[in-house]
Amino acid sequence: RMNAFMPATSANLYRLDTRWTDKPNTLVKIDGAQDLGGWVTAADVSPDGKTLAVLTNMPVMSVWLFSTSAPGDKFLSKGKGRQIVFRGGQQCEAICWIDGKTLMITNEQREIFRMPL
């Protein structure tokens, strides 16, 4: 049974097709994943556009790597992702690629972590 205060461990991936400044922009749902073990707090696409890194927090703190060999938006449903579980991050909220082999993760406590892959 899911705790009423615990966010869902599923995630949806959206794309913003327009960047208008004078009218609303509409997000388009392009993919989704059912159970990532923790709630999603951030995601970033690698510099080459082939890997999506997804950061999850409680109950399981981890980084998921979803890769694709063909260009497109279906990172989450094209196959099984690789999960890297880690500890000690406290409340991690942001992730970005430094280069094609290293991620940077930050938390609410103002700490910065490098994750070599």
Image (spheres, grey):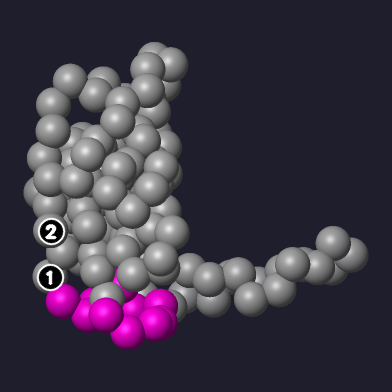
Discs 2, 1 touching: Cβ within 8 Å: yes
* Residue drawn at (47%, 75%) of the image: 29
Quarter of the figure with residue 77: bottom left
- Above or below, 37 against 88 in this view is below
- Residue that badge 2 annotates: 82
Query: What is the three-letter code of the residue carrying label 1?
Result: Lys
Q: Is residue 14 left or right of residue 32?
A: right
Q: Is residue 99 visible?
A: yes
* Residue drawn at (74%, 67%) of the image: 19
Q: What is the x, y in percent for residue 33?
A: 25, 67
- Residue that badge 1 annotates: 80
* Residue drawn at (36%, 36%) of the image: 104
* Residue drawn at (48%, 68%) of the image: 14
- Above or below, 101 against 106 in this view is below
Question: SS for tag 2?
Answer: strand
Quarter of the figure with residue 36: bottom left
Q: What is the x, y in percent for residue 8?
A: 27, 51
The magenta stretch spans which residues? 69-79
Q: Is residue 32 visible?
A: no
Callout 1: few (<14), some (14-19), or many (20+) C-alpha neighbours within 10 Å? few
Query: What is the three-letter code of the residue carrying label 2?
Result: Arg
